[in-house]
Image (cartoon, rainbow, N blue to C red):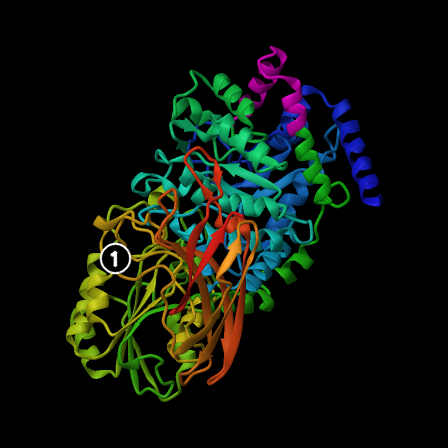
Amino acid sequence: MNKNNTLDTLEIQIQDILDIMTLKEKVGQLTMIELSRLMTTYNEMKPDKTEKGALDEKYLQEVIVDYGIGSILSGGNGAPLNSTVEAWTNTINKIQEWTLKSRLKIPILYGIDGVHGFDLAFGATIYPHNIGIAAARNLQLIEEYAKLTAEELNSVGITWNFAPVLDVARDPRWGRTYETFGEDPYLTSEMGKAFVLGLQENNKVAACGKHYVGYGSSQKGKDRGPIDISLRTLWEICLPPFKAAIESGLDTIMATSAEVNGTPVHASKTLLTDILRDKLKFNGVVISDWMDIEKLHVYHKTAIDISHAIKQAYSAGIDVSTVPFELSQAEQLVKLVEQGEIPMNIIDESVKRVLRLKFKLGLFNERFKASDKAQMIVGSKKSRDLAEALATESMTLLKNKNHLLPLSKEIKSVLIVGPSANSLSQLCGGWTMTWRGGNEDQLTTGKTVLDAIKEKVSPNTEVTFIEDSSNIIEIKSTAEKVEVCIAIVGEEPYAEGSGDRRNLNLSKDQLELLEILHDSQTPVVMVLVSGRPLTIKWESQNLPAILWAYLPGTEGGSAIANVLFGDHNPSGRLPITIPKDVYQLPLVYNTRINSKYEPLYPFGYGLSYTKFKYSHLDAPSEVKQGESINVSVKVKNIGNYDGDEIVELYISESYAPVTLPLKQLKGFKRVSLKQGEEKTVSFQIMPEQLCLVNDLEKIMVESRVIKIKIGDQSKQIILTTT
Ligand code: BGC
């Protein structure tokens, strides 16, 4: 009763505000502007508004007071003039001060893309990108990481995080693959859920599931390219992570810039209202992506001018437009409502959603932050330890011939080479200090792989680092002399479409470098620092040890050294398929039953220094549809190292009324096992995990036989309808 009372009081409070709002003020709440629009350097003639200045009072008056804008964001390049924690706090405080000068004094929502921590703040901890987090498969750690990220962001006044990315990456040529949790909808759902629960736990920061929907399924992985998918793919692959996040209380959603089946999502009532609101029961705020209402006119061309574009988007179900510079869009929206082109009740509902969120986040009670407190929180030891743990657990060992790894800390000599060996920005990737990342001097805290290895080995070990990869003669002669060569190779940082690729091989100079090392006859360990699978067929045939480190962040150097030198037994599992070559693409493990899956390394792959033995798979032999299934299995560590095993449960089916994926992940658990230790691991498969959907979105209930597989154990279960 109490709860209902407070709910009602809140709704009355919101209605009271709405009742006194002018149309312009309402539209202001539905508009998001970029920080640089408030800077002295803002100049409408410049298309690239990355030059930074201080906040300009003239613009604060215009944007915050005159237009009553409700949300401000810092885009990928949008940090304040000086991106220290102090500058962040002062900037947001100042904007909030100006909200108090506006008629209704409504606080602003401040959003950023904290896709791997507070990634636009000087001195912050940069966590691994999602692709690595998905490899770690540790739900508790991801939840803690999201919770800590919320604390870090909120300490300076940020209340909105445009994360998690819930897109399922179906083609690694896509430049945003590293922002995703990989190619599987179940894995993405579980990771996304844990992130949302952690981030929103204290009701201080709203999560934003993005990019609704289908974004990871574009043809050839082209960013913002057309997406043509069946309704089955939509319901089986693309929607489940959003559904799971919504069920976990997700506050906001960002629409994708792309078109799905011939309609841009920003103009799709079917996707934004019929499915999102009516079927998935989402009642939070839906925002546009960057400039995307305008793009209905200039890019997709479904609207003959911006005004028609605005009408299309608000009629389809967008609540807030990321304009992000032109205030004229707000004026046009006002006009459209005045002319009766957009009904007032649509606007009112959207405004209510925004106000509800501002109340939920406590913004009406507290809108200012203390920078000294923030400085204690951002980049703390606690966050660095957590980032290191996450990165360490993500490390995925692909090859380890003759147990080359782990290396002894007493090793006499090592040669370290490769462009990612002594660079923090390579470890962090895109969305780090700037949109594309790559700014070495802005990342002062953290350890490169080279530093971490030097710290790890004994004082007697001779560590030689040759920075210049073109210095072939020296590399060759040193490689011949040392005990082992470690090559830290990978990709340069990138973001979004700038990272789309046609091939996925290592650059020519890195390949040459690897060949020289290989020719030396000295064993070579290749550490791959990349946010997506690369085609490493030659490498996997010729080099004895390969470790995929993903984009592990500022603590990634330590994480890599932990695994190379045996302080941690590698336990990451591939969240995405590594293909042999690009001609196989798109190649995903849950491809349809009648296609081939012959990758270089399959989804779920990952070696350990120890060995695990599975036995006693226990499951009922017959289950009624609608009942959950309890499954258990025993796992024993029968090798010579303590270690974690990620136990994965897959199902497959021989016959069904629709063609099914070859196999599907339905459960996973990380368990720690000491040498000789055995544990029983249990799973519960929920009835909805066994639903079949046909091409008309209809859920089918059929009697059928499913096969459960955990490790090398399997069992058939008859699913009956009676
Ligand atoms: C990206 C979004 C991001 C937005 C704001 C867009 O380019 O697609 O993921 O949230 O910019 O920075």
Q: Is residue 609 above or below residue 495?
A: below
Residue 215 is a magenta residue: no
Amino acid type, residue under disc 1 in the picture = Glu
Q: Nearer the viewer, residue 673 or 565?
A: 673
The residue positioned 55% from the left and 24% from the top of the image is: 314
Q: Quadrant of residue 463?
A: bottom left
Predominant secondary structure, magenta span: helix
Please give the range of residues in magenta. 326-350
The percent coordinates of residue 364 (x first, y second) are 75, 40
User: Is 222 on the left or on the right of 372, as rendered?
Assistant: left
Q: Position of residue 359 (x, y in %)?
A: 73, 40
Quarter location, residue 484: bottom left
Image point 42% across, 55% down: which residue?
Answer: 706
Taking 523 as reference, is 488 above or below it? above
Direction front: furthest residue: 722
Question: Would you place residue 384 above or below residue 533 in this image?
Answer: below
Examine the rendering and report whether any part of residue 68 can be seen. Answer: no
Residue 410 at x, y = what percent?
36, 88
Please name the residue that numbered disc 1 is placed on.
598
Q: Is residue 653 visible?
A: yes
